[in-house]
Image: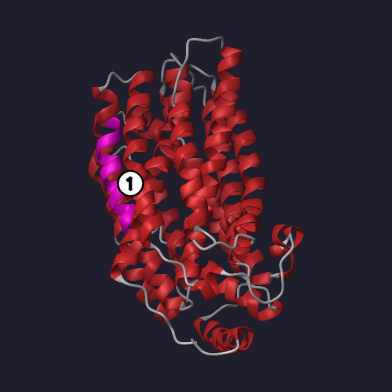
Amino acid sequence: METKKTSVLTKIAYASGEIGSQLSFYMISTYLTLFYTDAVGLAPVIVSGLMLAVRIFEAISAPIIGGVIDRTNSKLGKCRPWIIRSLPLLVIFSILTFSNFNIGSGLKVVYAGVTYIGLALLYSLMTGATQTMANTLTPDSQERAVLNSWKNASGSFAGIILAGITMNLIIALGNDSSAYFYTNLIYALVSIPLFLMTFFFCKEDPTLATSSGLKVSMIESLTSAVHNSQLLSLMLYNVLTLTATFSRLGVMAYYYIYTVGRPDLMGMILMGFQIGQLIPPFIVPFMVKKWGKKPIFFIANFGQAASLLALHFFGQVGLPVVFVASFTLGFFMMNGLTTFNATSDCIEYEFYKTGKLSPGSIVGAVTLSVKIGLAIGGSIGIFLIGLTGYGANVEITPAIQNGISLVVNIFPAVLFVVALLALVPYKLTNKRVAEIQAANIAKMKELHGSEE
């Protein structure tokens, strides 16, 4: 089977889906907690419990979604049907999640839970389909790395724009619940043509998008990590690293608004963070090719930990320190892109060990680890913020300011270092992956009967 390169149009279309995802995820990850506490008026402890409950549900659904994608065989492929099916509901639930109705506080909690669960489930389905698609577009690991680099670079460009305009747009629209609603409405509508571009111009390879080899049951889909040691190592690393990331991401607005004390400059500061994230997609493929993925994970985690320590200890010295540390924090967030590439290696390893071609299940398992990290991190961040004494209409004292900085910076810095222990058993070096791919190509030839 000859390696099949992807066209520039395919790369652009694949990347456009990531921009659409960014438009949805940016409001969820950065502003939903702030919307619930400052606009809707929910207490931090209630928001913490809500985040935990919704994200546990989201985590449980992730491998199920992966199994559903794996068992999909249609003329459109495995992934494209789910993009077009989930898009309308994703937009609707995104709009509903940032709607604030004049109802009792108890009903507000129920409404928030129902709409956020719906949004989380649909977002998981959309991202599960788009992320799995890289493995049905080309069998080449390096080409998949290029696809993911295009995706991440486009996501970073989108992040820069969103960081620069979102808070200013919310303030310009009145900085109340309706401001969050209209900002999110704009983003939801803009995401529609971006997802449609992915659907229409990413053509899945039939030999990769059709189930082959041994059949995978739903139970096996849900337990992919149990017998795949490399996947399990990657998942544990993911849980710890993303707990660190999301514990900060959901509450960092509090740090810039209340500790740094410059909400007017928050957009510009976050732009520095996003500009830092723009660089890795252009250099990570070369780093992966030269060193492999494991060393990059170590560089990323130590770099992020150092940047967070600088923000805590020197952030109040002056805004230049905040800008520089935010930029380096974004630059060292190269573990996400590397995880996408390592996931493809785990898919190859699974097929090599078992003869089961199950990209959706592996992506679902990795997504499960992402959702667990999101569940723990998203809930513990706002919970710890509540312990600092912060609350709606509470006077912000120096003790609260310092407590917010500890939660936003020191806590995740420690987790980034601890997460590296999970990678000790990870053995998929470049040389080993090349050996596995060669064996898998021979196996695919045998399964399909002839070379393509």
Is residue 330 visible from the viewing direction of this image?
Answer: no
Q: Is residue 154 magenta?
A: yes
Residue 270 location, x and y as percent? 30, 42
The local secondary structure at tag 1 comes to: helix
The magenta stretch is 152-167
Residue 343 location, x and y as percent? 54, 67
Q: Residues within 10 Å of mark 1 (few under 14, many from 20)?
A: few
- Predominant secondary structure, magenta span: helix
Report the front residue among 299 and 311. 299
> Which quarter of the figure has residue 433?
bottom right
Q: Relative to 384, is 43 above or below?
A: above
Q: Which residue is mark 1?
A: 193
Q: How is the image coloured?
A: secondary structure
Residue 313 location, x and y as percent? 38, 43
User: Residue drawn 52% across and 19% down?
Assistant: 42
Total of numbered circles in the picture? 1
Could you tell me the amino acid type at mark 1? Pro
Report the front residue among 251 and 366. 366
User: Residue drawn 29% across and 69% down?
Assistant: 8
Q: Is residue 156 magenta?
A: yes
Q: Relative to 198, is 30 above or below?
A: above
Residue 444 location, x and y as percent? 59, 84
> Which quarter of the figure has residue 113?
top right
* Side of 85 where 423 appears, left or right: right
User: Residue drawn 40% across and 75% down?
Assistant: 143
Is residue 344 visible from the viewing direction of this image?
Answer: yes
Report the front residue among 130 and 243. 130
